[in-house]
Amino acid sequence: MLDVGKPSPGGFTLSDKMIECGEPEDELVGLGQEYGTGEADVVALEARVAEIVEAMEKRPSSPERPVEDSPAVCAWPDPR
């Protein structure tokens, strides 16, 4: 929900952020495909999945209210 009088980031900034937020999911899909075709072995698969999941778990649960000082993958930009 938008607050009255609150500045909003531009469309390109928001678009870039949406793309960034979807990257971990895209990485998981690509990794699964690599494993399925034999391009990635089990050790590489498990290591990379652990990294991706850890990064996803660090995201704030609510993009409207990012956790302060969070190293979140998907933190929304401050429009100020």
Image (tube, rainbow, N blue to C red):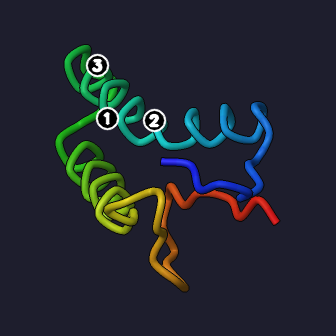
Identify which amino acid the numbered label 2 is placed on: Gly
Whole-angstrom CA distance, mark 1 to mark 2, is 10 Å
Circle 3: element type: helix
Q: Is residue 79 left or right of residue 50?
A: right
Q: Residue at x 20, y 50 (%)?
A: 46
Mark earlier in primary sequence (2, 3): 2
On screen, residue 11 versus residue 47, left or right, reads right
Question: Which residue is under mark 3?
Answer: 33
Where does the image place residue 78, in percent across and percent down from the top left? 71, 64
Q: Identify the residue at image location x=31%, y=64%.
A: 54
Q: Quadrant of residue 63?
A: bottom left
Badge 1 amino acid: Leu
Q: Nearer the viewer, residue 41 or 80?
A: 80
Report x, y in % for residue 49.
26, 49
Q: Nearer the viewer, mark 1 or mark 3?
A: 1
Expressed as whole percent of the image width and height from the top left, the position of residue 28 reads: 31, 35
Residue identifier under label 2: 22
User: Which residue lies at the image location 65% right of the left edge and 54% below the top edge?
Assistant: 4
Neighbours of disc 2 within 10 Å: few (<14), some (14-19), many (20+)? few
Quadrant in which the C terminus appears: bottom right
Distance of mark 1 from mark 3, alpha carbons? 9 Å
Q: Secondary structure at mark 2?
A: helix
Residue with the mark numbered 1: 28
Residue 22 point in image, percent of width and height: 45, 35
Q: Are marks 1 and 3 in contact (CB under 8 Å)?
A: no
Q: Distance between the Cα atoms at labels 2 and 3?
A: 17 Å
Residue projecting furthest to the top: 37
* Frontmost residue, 1 versus 30: 1
